Image (cartoon, rainbow, N blue to C red):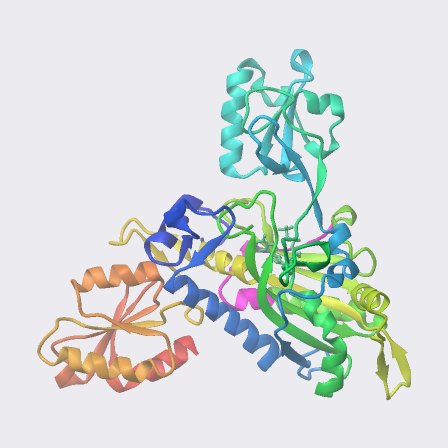
């Protein structure tokens, strides 16, 4: 999706992802399982590239700070299951809730804050119809349903919209749920905890109850003292972690955008309270430019400050939270969250200090000052980031054989180059094999001799491979190959011994 125009539907992208081995529904042969996805060979490569670039750019070669020196960030990989008290201290047991309504008739469950109502004015007042989320599909379904109910009342002047959570009991009683025909089947909103629980050990009871982590962040706070004591880091510094997180989302939807198992890439940046605002601005800038550096178009990215009533339980004070949002096809022309940059204050360290009764204060020897650092947290979705890259790359093109190509930035593409012998004889496969062996030392490269060259190019277009190098009948004598560029389909001839240099320049 280039610039700000949306030229395709999510169905098309989802079907390409299935067809070309990016993403499959989990447990598909058993009918699937809502909210879970498996990554195929190309999806895994794309996600790993995103993960590795983040790790390289944030941990191994971190950004330059406001003073021009590299900031200091170390890595961590903590357990998914921790002591259950962690989640009481973090506020997730008490506060990690979404308001939810059930439909008594269909047994469907919805997030109340995702249900909008169309309240009808005039003669029809009191008749209220609900639809989910405002995305294309649910809106279309709701419109259809509305038309069925109130053919005459559809002019915009007759309709008011409002959020379901704000409805009174009387209004709820006349609300029609998204999947029913009868009014009054929705329960009042109730709080629903999003954490998955299980038990450890042989005895299953309340004492053995544990949770799958809903965010990777807490593992970092738990190890704050360990890292300070073992790594000779000095505040300000960051701890980074990439890993799985689990949330029993009420309504998983929009492909991998909101799933129940997903991956996060989080940094907890520890700093002095007086410097928190400066670092908050720094991380907002760094993170939003980083997404652009791997191929997301600036026009499709937006920074949005959270309203006060949206703030998470840890971010009530301080500079608040900025979301880095991306214009996904299902939010178009609006935006959806890709990453949150939050000022968490010293909420987490002080809560863990209180609940664990272990001292977590940092001692600054230079200033002879002991304090609980404040935390700026850039928390990005690795799964959502992968989706943003897929959405950005998908480019319909009716004039080419594949009708679509995936315009990934070369450094993130799951296949970075292909080496094709034009035909499987006359020494061409041997030269191709030699070049492929050389290139694969540094890049993700495939080689393939089957089918016509046009079909092989078409396959690479759908896989998003930026460069195809073709060995033909002249290569043996002129020591040159044809490079075909994915986006323009332009072809040029370059020397065989310059292919690696070409790749270094284009891919890095
Ligand atoms: P949302 O408002 O979309 O539920 P959130 O504000 O709860 O997200 P955070 O707790 O800030 O999300 O999590 C940080 C990042 O983790 C998000 O920006 C997103 O990229 C990712 N993320 C959160 N929930 C999910 C999910 N259910 N599926 C995929 N990614 C998710």
Instruction: Say which residue appears at 53% left-offset and 69% top-offset.
Output: 293
Which of 213/276 is in front? 213
Instruction: Say which residue appears at 46% left-offset and 54% top-offset.
Output: 37
| Figure quadrant of residue 269 | bottom right
Magenta includes 304?
yes
Residue 508, percent from left and from top: 44, 79
Residue 145, percent from left and from top: 52, 23
Residue 438, percent from left and from top: 30, 85
The answer to whether residue 220 is above or below residue 312 is below
Residue 19, percent from left and from top: 33, 53
In this image, 40 relative to 95: left or right?
A: left
Question: Can residue 385 be seen in the rendering of this structure?
Answer: yes
**Residue at the extreme right:** 368
**Ligand 1 visible in quadrant:** bottom right
The answer to whether residue 467 is above or below residue 28 is below
Provide the residue span drawn in magenta.
289-306
Instruction: Say which residue appears at 70% left-offset and 76% top-offset.
Output: 238
């Amino acid at each position: 999706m280039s610039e700000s125009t949306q030229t395709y539907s999510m169905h098309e992208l989802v079907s390409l992802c299935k067809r070309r081995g990016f993403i499959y529904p989990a447990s598909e042969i058993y009918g699937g399982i809502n909210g879970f996805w498996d990554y195929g060979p190309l999806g895994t490569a794309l996600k790993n590239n995103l993960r590795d670039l983040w790790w390289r750019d944030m941990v191994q070669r971190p950004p330059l700070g406001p003073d021009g020196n590299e900031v200091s960030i170390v890595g961590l990989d903590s357990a998914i299951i921790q002591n259950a008290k962690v989640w009481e201290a973090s506020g997730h047991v008490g506060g990690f809730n979404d308001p939810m309504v059930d439909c008594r008739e269909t047994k469907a469950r919805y997030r109340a804050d995702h249900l909008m109502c169309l309240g009808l004015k005039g003669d029809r007042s009191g008749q209220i119809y609900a639809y989910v989320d405002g995305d294309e599909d649910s809106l279309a379904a709701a419109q259809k349903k509305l038309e069925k109910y109130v053919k005459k009342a559809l002019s915009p002047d007759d309709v008011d919209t409002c959020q379901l959570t704000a409805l009174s009991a009387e209004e709820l009683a006349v609300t029609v749920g998204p999947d029913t025909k009868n009014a009054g089947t929705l329960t009042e909103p109730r709080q629903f905890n999003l954490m998955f629980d299980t038990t450890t050990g042989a005895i299953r009871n309340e004492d053995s109850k544990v949770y799958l982590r809903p965010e990777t962040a807490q593992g970092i706070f738990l190890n704050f003292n360990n890292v300070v004591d073992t790594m000779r880091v000095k505040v300000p510094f960051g701890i980074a972690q990439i890993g799985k997180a689990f949330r029993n989302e009420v309504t998983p939807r929009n492909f991998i955008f909101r799933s129940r198992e997903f991956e996060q890439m989080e940094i907890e940046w520890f700093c002095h309270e007086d410097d928190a605002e400066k670092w908050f601005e720094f991380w907002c800038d760094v993170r939003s430019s980083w997404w652009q550096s791997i191929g997301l178009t600036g026009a499709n990215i937006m920074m949005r400050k959270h309203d006060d009533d949206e703030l998470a339980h840890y971010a009530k004070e301080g500079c608040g939270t900025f979301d880095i949002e991306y214009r996904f096809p299902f939010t178009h022309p609006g935006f959806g969250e890709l990453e949150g940059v939050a000022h968490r204050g010293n909420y987490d360290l002080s809560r863990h200090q209180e609940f664990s009764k272990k001292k977590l204060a940092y001692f600054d020897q230079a200033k002879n000052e002991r304090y609980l650092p404040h935390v700026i947290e850039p928390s990005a979705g690795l799964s959502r980031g992968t989706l943003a890259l897929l959405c950005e790359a998908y480019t319909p093109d009716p004039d080419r054989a594949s009708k679509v190509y995936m315009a990934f930035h070369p450094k993130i593409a799951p296949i970075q180059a292909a080496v094709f012998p034009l035909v499987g004889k006359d020494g061409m496969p041997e030269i191709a094999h030699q070049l492929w062996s050389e290139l694969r030392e540094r890049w993700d490269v495939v080689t393939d001799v089957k089918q016509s060259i046009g079909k092989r190019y078409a396959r690479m277009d759908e896989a998003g491979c930026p460069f195809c190098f073709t060995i033909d009948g002249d290569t043996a004598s002129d020591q040159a190959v044809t490079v075909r560029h994915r986006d323009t389909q332009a072809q040029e001839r370059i020397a065989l011994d310059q292919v690696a240099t070409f790749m270094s320049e284009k891919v890095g």
